[in-house]
Amino acid sequence: MIKKNPPHLPLRFFRWFCHPKLRDSIEGDLMELYEERKVKGGKLKADIIFIKDVLLLCRPGIIRPTDGYQNLNTYGMYKNYFKISLRQLVKNKTFAAINISVLTLGFSCFILLALYLHDELSFDRFHADAEKIYRIIQHEQQENGTIRSVSSVAPALGKEAREQFQEVEDMCRLSAFGRVTLGNDPQTRTHERALSADPNFFTFFNFPLIEGDPKTVLQNSDAIVISESIKEKYFGEGPALGKQIWSGYMRQGKPVYLTVDGVMKDFPKNSHLQISLLFSDATWNVQYNDYAQYVNTDWVDTEYTTYLKLKPQSDVALLTAKIKNLVKSNYPADREFKSNFELQPLQEIHTETEQFQTAADEFNAHNIKPV
């Protein structure tokens, strides 16, 4: 039998600081190493190395907890807690039912509120440049002193702002086209609400196309982009790209047929824009004489909902002042200019839209709020 006689004090110190769960196995290893070293190098050398090993073992993970170590089986304790709670519930049924009902109602309200807030705060945040996009709001004083706030501005403003102001990276405009009659079959023709858009609409925003190229759609006159639902309604499940559909318009005595330039996914519910039919803005040019000149020179009519994409670190307040000065300098001399402007962040439109009249809503009077 091997005699185990390492230094007494270091061994006691080890037994004091070592975690009880680890003590036996580590102490056994220390003893074996000590005996081997004593045989090979003598007791003095083995004692020195033993002391060194003990000191090296004094580290987190091996040191026992400062509040002591208790190896308790808590299963029985929790089992008794459960039994007592169950007995109390059975004994006080009315009180327990009230408490459980109130607790359930509270949790349900919290979950519903959290889901509602999550949905509200998710609006328009799926666009890649959402934080850089702003909508121009115009506050116009009326003759009776009230303020008419609209989210549609003069046609020429967006283009001139992009060309003149270094803060503006890009712009995109929408205008109400009205309700159009669609359908090649007279028996199934229906009315659809339509908007017109600049050609860069699908590169400015991130609404995905199922068919068509976002860089080339809406370039030509009589070109349309339809939603997936509209496509299935009029063309079925097959591809619709390049197909034509009667629009209900007549031009020089001939019916106007629209060409499907693209098919877009139905807009998500958490978008302030809900569009199923988009006309190319170029369609206006052939439908109405001198329309191109009107778009580039008119500073009075509030026809276009205009979005600006700003460059990083742009001063929004300074740009707003520049926009006001730009419109004022181009306003007809025979008319009094009584408007102020605001740049509304895209991500705030959903929660702050009800007070604004917008061209994209076909001038819905319910969206006008006198101030």
Image (cartoon, helix red, strand yellow):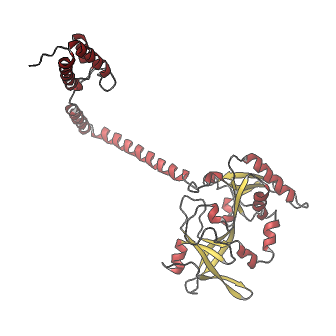
Q: Is residue 110 above or below residue 367?
A: above
**What residue occupies the far front of the structure in this picture?**
40
Of residues 197 and 5, the one nearer the viewer is: 5
The residue located at (27%, 17%) in the rendering is: 49
Percent across and percent down for residue 174 are: 68, 65
Of residues 41 and 226, the one nearer the viewer is: 41
Q: Quadrant of residue 71?
A: top left
Percent across and percent down for residue 219 are: 68, 73
**What residue occupies the far top of the structure in this picture?**
9
Residue 241 can be seen in this image: yes
The residue located at (91%, 61%) in the rendering is: 334
The residue located at (45%, 45%) in the rendering is: 110
Q: Quadrant of residue 332?
A: bottom right
Q: Where's the N terminus, which quadrant?
A: top left
The residue located at (30%, 17%) in the rendering is: 52
Percent across and percent down for residue 352 are: 64, 52
**What residue occupies the far bottom of the structure in this picture?**
253
In the picture, measured across the screen, residue 160 lies left or right of residue 64, that is right
